[in-house]
């Protein structure tokens, strides 16, 4: 069952029946998912994650788009100006990232990406929670996201988190339609 989460952990631990249990063997506790702001030391791991996520996209995406999604460490560093990035880690391994920036007083969420091997485990939800908390602390009245219109999982994910689809920019990025999503806080 889905449940929204805060900055420091993902889902309630399941199956922890305590040492005195005489029932079936306890399911091991999942390692906690930590969401924290990134530091420069995290950049190589973030870039490796973005490369993996980009390489895992279905064929047919414009090569310019894929290139933009897979920055090297120097490019990523230059894109960090004015953007707050969070990373989600489990056992020290970076599983996802998200960026947020204030634009005209509202919060633009970008670079949301989760390791394909860690999907549907609440990683993006934890990241979005941190971004939303950051937006609230920054007094942003709304959060918005632009995503490839053909990416149905992100649309489902955002709607699950209270976003509404605000429109489409047609042939906007290297010929691709971009869907806009917003959530008023
Ligand atoms: C979209 C994405 C960020 C979701 O990450 P995630 O960690 O798997 O998401 P969560 O586990 O937090 O999902 C929470 C809910 O969102 C919805 N959702 C997530 N992925 C979905 C999918 N593939 N299909 C349908 N619904 C989905 C579900 O309601 C899910 O809850 P459930 O698992 O209990 O059904 C991830 O698939 C991804 O990185 N995709 C590639 C990059 C991308 O599209 N980035 C967005 C550009 S802005």
Image (spheres, rainbow, N blue to C red):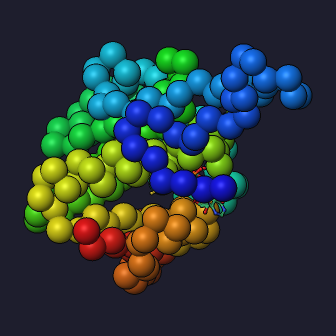
Which quarter shows the N terminus?
bottom right
Q: Which quarter holds ligand 1?
A: bottom right
Q: Nearer the viewer, residue 54 or 106?
A: 106
143 is higher (above) or lower (below) than 73: below
- Is residue 133 toward the left or the right of residue 30 in the image? left
Q: Nearer the viewer, residue 8 or 94?
A: 8
Residue 17 in the image: state x and y as whole percent: 72, 29
Residue 101 in the image: state x and y as whole percent: 21, 51
**How many marks overall?**
0
Residue at image location 46% in from the left, 23% down from the top: 45
Residue at image location 50% in from the left, 48% down from the top: 124
Which quarter shows the C terminus?
bottom left
* Residue 138 appears in view: yes
Q: Specify the farthest residue to the bottom.
A: 167
* Residue 114 appears in view: no
Residue at image location 65% in from the left, 49% down from the top: 120
44 is higher (above) or lower (below) than 156: above
Determine which quarter of the picture holds residue 102. bottom left
Determine which quarter of the picture holds residue 135. bottom left
92 is higher (above) or lower (below) than 74: above
């Amino acid at each position: 069952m889905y449940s929204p989460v805060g900055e420091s952990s993902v889902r309630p631990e399941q199956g922890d029946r305590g040492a005195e249990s005489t029932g079936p063997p306890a399911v091991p506790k999942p390692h906690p998912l930590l969401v924290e702001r990134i530091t420069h030391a995290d950049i190589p791991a973030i870039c490796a994650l973005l490369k993996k996520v980009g390489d895992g996209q279905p064929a047919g995406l414009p090569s310019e788009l894929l290139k933009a999604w897979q920055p090297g460490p120097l490019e990523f560093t230059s894109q960090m100006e004015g953007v707050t990035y969070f990373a989600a880690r489990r056992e020290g391994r970076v599983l996802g990232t998200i960026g947020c920036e204030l634009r005209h007083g509202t919060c633009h969420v970008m670079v949301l990406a989760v390791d394909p091997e860690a999907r549907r485990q609440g990683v993006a939800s934890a990241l979005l929670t941190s971004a939303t908390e950051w937006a609230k602390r920054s007094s942003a009245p709304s959060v918005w996201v632009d995503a490839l219109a053909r990416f149905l999982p992100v649309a489902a994910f955002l709607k699950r988190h209270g976003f509404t689809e605000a429109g489409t920019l047609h042939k906007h990025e290297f010929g691709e339609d971009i869907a806009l999503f917003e959530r008023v806080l």
